[in-house]
Amino acid sequence: MTDYRFLEKIRETEASANTRIVEARADADALKQKAREDADGLIESAWHQAERFHAEIMGEAEQAYRALLAEAAAQDHASLLDDKTVRRLGAKLSERIVELIGRR
């Protein structure tokens, strides 16, 4: 009778251990799922933050570009060279361009 009780106690302990293993696996799966969801949320938040930062930087760059254009438009770009020199330099530049294109 004692052996029977001992064997029954072993079976109960094994069943309890198996139940705990199943519960632990379920808990681990739930924790993994929560970690995935948290990570997804962090990644999505980071993407939104990066998009806002990119938009801000692009806005600043566009403002700087427009300021440069306005400044350039306000300046007088009259050449200090006489017409003869400008024509001569234009001809040399044209020759050089044709020469470079011909080397392709």
Image: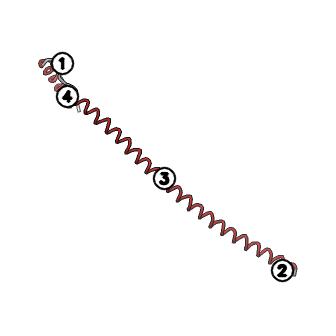
Q: Secondary structure at mark 4?
A: helix
Circle 3: residue type = Ile
Total numbered labels:
4
- Categorize mark 3 by other alpha carbons within 10 Å: few (<14), some (14-19), many (20+): few
Q: CA distance from mark 3 to mark 2?
A: 58 Å
Q: Quadrant of residue 104?
A: top left
Q: Which residue is mark 3?
A: 43
Q: Residue at x 18, y 18 (%)?
A: 80
Image mark for residue 97? 4
Seen from the viewer's position, the closer of residues 67 and 40 is 67
Image mark for residue 80? 1
Q: Earlier in the sequence, mark 1 or mark 3?
A: 3
- 49 relative to 68 in the view: left or right: right
Q: Earlier in the sequence, mark 2 or mark 4?
A: 2
In this rendering, which labeled residue sits more in front, label 2 or label 1? 1
- 1 relative to 56 in the view: left or right: right
Q: CA distance from mark 1 to mark 3?
A: 58 Å
Circle 1: residue type = Leu
On the image, the x and y values in percent for residue 84 come to 12, 18
- Categorize mark 1 by other alpha carbons within 10 Å: few (<14), some (14-19), many (20+): few
In this rendering, which labeled residue sits more in front, label 3 or label 4? 3
Q: Earlier in the sequence, mark 3 or mark 2?
A: 2
Q: In the figure, 38 relative to 25: above or below?
A: above
